[in-house]
Image (tube, grey):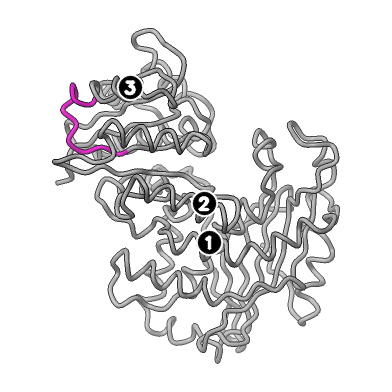
Amino acid sequence: MTQPFTLVIFGVTSNLAQKYLLPALYDLEDKGLLPDGSHIIGIARSPQKEGWIQEHLHQILHKENLHHKHEIKDQIKELLFTRLHYLDGHLDNPDFYQKLKIKLDGLNSQNIIFYLATYPDLYQPIFENLKLSGLSNLADGFVRLMIEKPFGSNLKTAKQLNKTLHQYFKEEQIYRLDHYLGKEALRDILSFRFGSSSVESIINKDHIDHIQVSATENFGVGERGAFYDKVGALKDVGQNHLLQMLTAATMEKPITFTNEEVTKERVKILKKLLPQKENIIFGQYEDYTAEKNISPDSLTETFFALKTFINNDRYQNVPIYLRAGKKLAQTLTEVTIVFKDKKNQPLRYHVHSQRDNFLVQDPYEALILDAIRGDQTYFNDVQEVEAQWAFTDPLSAESEKGIPVIYQPGSWGPQEADELIEQDGRHWINF
């Protein structure tokens, strides 16, 4: 039986907490997966009246949310209400952490998960004050830290962040969260591949013509303009989501399916990826600069397509094409393996799914459960994050040099992206 725990959410009023985290906690409650005696403490800056956090959750659950569309049961909601607590305070103020400690002691919290749903510039004061207050380690029970991507903005800043993290926490306490690793479909890739010897026997250079990884969206930046304009498509989804899909589809079978062994195989693939600066295209959808919170002279890419190779014996000379973008013809998130023998249909792993079915586990549900259990298999470790940036940095430097190609909303992106793959006698697979 999973031990009771207290989840402390720094930034409970953030978009991330409202859209993903709190609805996922409702679903865990509904499925009976939150241990008895567990608590949730939401933290934000503003003082609120008694009962505010319960009303806040009520409004979130009844608000239209593409990621959480099923019926809300009053009985389950009321049960979750009993676990909820609220604390206000400034996260750079040491006195606040004494207040937090008193609250945790009052709840008899022996196991704590700190979830950072805040801006990265608050990480350092949070880490420092947790340590000074004695909350980064407990004599009895566990302390774990869940931290959302982005993990830095390049290899240098990722290393700085990891160095900072290790000043206050051990690596086994750190759960770097990329929600793609919580998707059932992505996890199922490993089960499908390694559960079938006939499938695994043809996943190699002798049988594969090429591999495509796509993460296309039929909508724009929406309310994320201020953040998105600072990062662009390559850093937003290429450096993490697409590489997660690629490594799952191409990694070797681990000796055992432990966190260490699975992560080790993902990292091996990342370290063998060849960044080819001459084989990348950047695009921007028309009228992107008219979007909310976007600079009128922005050169940020909303689309990229690239070609790469895995420099190992299994995939030697097998071209790999990656693409991602916004305001495209269709929302499509998948890995497609195309075989040389045309009698073999392409192998397609669908990663994106509209969650109309309550039985399809939300990525945040899966990752919260993993953190409760102490399973880091589907979280990024320090080596994986740095290997992702090591591949992406040279390509990102190319985007900073030039002007992205303008493409029409509702298309599949710039013509140059088609030419990138068509010059090799291949084409993008669009469904």
Classify 147 as above or below 14. below
Residue 309: % across, % down:
62, 78
Residue 228: % across, % down:
67, 42
- In the picture, measured across the screen, residue 356 lies left or right of residue 51, that is right
Secondary structure beneath dot 2 equals loop
- In the picture, measured across the screen, residue 63 lies left or right of residue 145, that is right
Segment colored magenta: 104-113
Which residue appears at 22% of the width and 36% of the height? 5
Residue matched to label 2: 353
Residue 343: % across, % down:
59, 86
Which residue appears at 33% of the width and 47% of the height? 169
Dot label at residue 350: 1
Residue matched to label 3: 74
Mark 1 burial class by Cα count in 10 Å: few <14, some 14-19, many 20+ = some
Secondary structure beneath dot 1 equals strand
Dot 1 amino acid type? His
Which residue appears at 62% of the width and 57% of the height? 215
Dot label at residue 97: none
